Image (cartoon, rainbow, N blue to C red):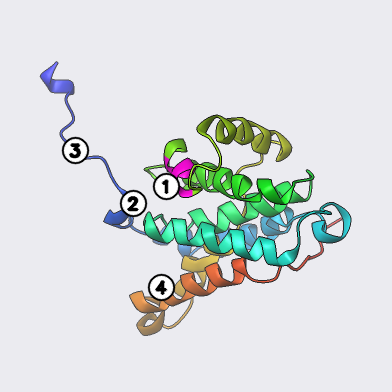
Amino acid sequence: MEELYCSEAPATCGEGPIAEADPALLDDHRVLDNLLQLQAYSIPAQDYFLHIQADIQPYMRKVVTKWMMEVCEEQACEDQVFPVAINFLDRFLCTCVVQKTQLQLLGAVCLLLASKLRQCRPLSVELMSYYTDYSVSAEEIKRWELLLVSKLGWDLSPVTAGDFMDHLLRRLPSRIGREPTVKRHATVFVALAATGKYQMQKRPP
């Protein structure tokens, strides 16, 4: 049995990237072309403030997305978690009417699910309940997680701005694209853009 023992410590979010960037993927233009094509299908289908949501206003979305960003920062989540969670939030709001009292619950569920998909150590249900000051229970979060994946049709691999980061930086001059501060600043800009005013974009026919 000792031969089966793995002494490797589990990875945590604060340890940095688990794997190095793969130049075979980053240097292949076909990968970037595919991302550009697939991104169109990850865009929310309509302006939900006009057609779906009656109780939620744009400023409420800004408040909850800033709260989501603060949770990600405090928990040192990987860069991809926040934009994926925002994509889940917007797409769900396109399909299901939500009361303003349920918006933070939805944000917590989106973060929970995005962390399960985009980082090694997912956030826990109990932790998300804590971040809502226990205004929502763990059971509510679990029920809404099932509702979320159902309404999204189990399409849980959206292409977001974060997916383009390494590809675009790789195409900059090496002295710029490989500078760590450039990627950090770009990541911050992507996050701030996600918390800003929601603007509907046209999806392909």
Q: How far across and down, in percent of the image, does residue 100 sit?
A: 71, 51
On screen, residue 147 versus residue 180, left or right, reads right
Task: Please name the amino acid that badge 2 sits on.
Answer: Cys
On screen, residue 165 versus residue 74, left or right, reads right
Q: Residue at x 59, y 33 (%)?
A: 140
Task: Please name the amino acid that badge 3 sits on.
Answer: Glu
Q: Residue at x 42, y 47 (%)?
A: 119
Q: Which residues are magenta?
A: 127-131
Q: Would you say residue 30 is visible in this rendering?
A: no
Residue matched to label 3: 8
Q: Earlier in the sequence, mark 1 or mark 3?
A: 3
Q: Earlier in the sequence, mark 1 or mark 2?
A: 2
Give the secondary structure at mark 2: helix
Disc number for residue 184: 4
CB-based contact (under 8 Å), mark 1 and mark 2: yes
Q: How far across and down, in percent of the image, does residue 152 sit?
A: 70, 40
Give the secondary structure at mark 3: loop
Of 30 and 191, the residue lying toward us: 191
In the displayed structure, 184 sits above or below 102; it is below
Residue matched to label 2: 13
